[in-house]
Image: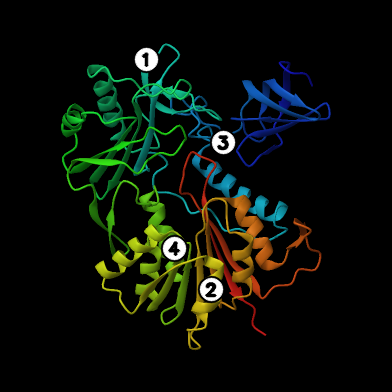
Amino acid sequence: MEKNGIYEGTVTALGTDGEGIINIEGTTAFVPFCLVGEKISFKALKVKGNIAYGKIEKVLKAAPERVNAPCPVFAKCGGCDIQHMNYAAQLAFKRDTVAAALRKIGGISFEVGETVPCVSEYRYRNKLALPVGVNADGETVCGFYAPHSHRIVDTADCLIQAEWVKKVISAVKSFAKNGRIKGYNEETRTGVLRRIVVREIGGKFIFALVATKHIDCTQLISELEKDFKDFTFLLNINASQGNAVFSDEWRLCRGLGYFEAEECGVKYRAGAQTFVQVNDDIRAKLYARALAEAEEGAVALDLYSGGGMLTAMLAKRCGTAYGVEIVEEASRCADELREANGLGGKMYNICGAVENEIEKVFALTDGKKRIIVCDPPRKGMERSVVKAVKRSGADKIILISCNPATLARDLGLLLGTLREEGGNLIKSSAPESDYKINSITPFDMFPQTKWCETLVVLEKNRV
């Protein structure tokens, strides 16, 4: 196979990113936006040894699961990967992706449950993080990044965002044009407007405009007031050259800068940087399933607890819950959350390294059933945390993961199907573990994309 050559082939499988896999002339080609069973023609964009990466030219024979993607910038914008699949196929793909990762990476064979669907295939996101920049002609644009780049694809809408996204984009573009304020150019480090971040919580909105310097936001606030009534507005001044969304410099321009909200009976204060899952429907279903696994009267230990939302839910459910978080600011927020919900004596927040606190907490449990709940970042658990969890003696372990690959690695280490040898992970032919899998369930937190959340429940083997 040669670069820039045009080839025809039949898709035999899908990769973890949803790309089609085609075998031709001893070369395996990965081509996005096609489906199993389809015959396509594609252009080979990159060829290295017996691996190639291509771009679809034409679908010669379509699969029954193929649909016309409704978004006009699908395949140009990097936000959605699988809009060309019908929804049933998307759910099956995510289940298969989780199962394949567990098998190939973790050496785990277990029947993964059906993917829990979202009530809405589109318009499900409650958060918008919209880059603002300039195009090749120097004009200010708003949109989303193209795949594997920071080139902004200009758009007036996004179908996985709520309907209000159109009004936000229109207001920002009008503000930039009328005020003659340029979008930020990452290459030349010039321009002012970098991003608009919006969070909707219970019909209330938090707007945060990110700019390289202090600017008058009165006109933008006036534009937003035409369509939004109950909102607060902040200006974040970020002149750094990195990719961090926010700096530590804030200006409050309208409202209080936060809203009071409630989730699963837990009251909390939400601001521009508060982490809340982007899909209200799936968030509720995921938390409900996790809490159903936490028995009343047990002691729950919430690892990577952040601002304490899940810890508080566990405290209300079990009666006693400990949250462990290494970031001091997040731990302080968790203390405020405890007081706001009257959970003194039930909810305990510990600021420290997760692996150092598990044994200390469980030494205080007085024979009660012990449950670990772990929702780590996308990179998964540190190796030291996995080892601490494995030797903890917890009666039940509930894992929540947004990355099937790191989930498979961590789960393999917990179950003994993987072992560490000389700094490398090797599949074990004779795994040993105190735990067994009770259930593995994917949740479709992100329809139209390759991503999903997965809930895994482990139980201690009974002798």
Provide residue 189's location: percent of width, then percent of height: 43, 23
Rounded to the nearest angstrom, the CA distance separating label 3 from label 4 is 40 Å
Say whether marks 1 and 2 touch (CB < 8 Å).
no
**Quadrant position of residue 39:** top right
The type of colouring in the image is rainbow
Nearest the eye: 171 or 448? 171
Q: Amino acid at mark 1?
A: Glu
The answer to whether 156 appears left or right of 327 in the picture is left
| Label 2 element class | helix
Write down the residue under mark 4: 305
Of badges 1 and 3, the one in the foreground is 1
Local secondary structure at mark 4: loop
Mark 4: which amino acid? Ser
4 or 1: tag closer to the N-terminus: 1
> Distance from label 2 to label 3 (Cα)?
47 Å
Position in image of residue 275 (x %, y %): 38, 52
Which of the image's four quarters has the N terminus? top right
What is the number of the mark on residue 65?
3
Q: CA distance from mark 2 to mark 4?
A: 13 Å
Q: Is residue 308 left or right of residue 69?
A: left
Residue tagged 2? 358
Q: CA distance from mark 1 to mark 2?
A: 54 Å
Q: Which residue is mark 1?
A: 139
Local secondary structure at mark 3: loop
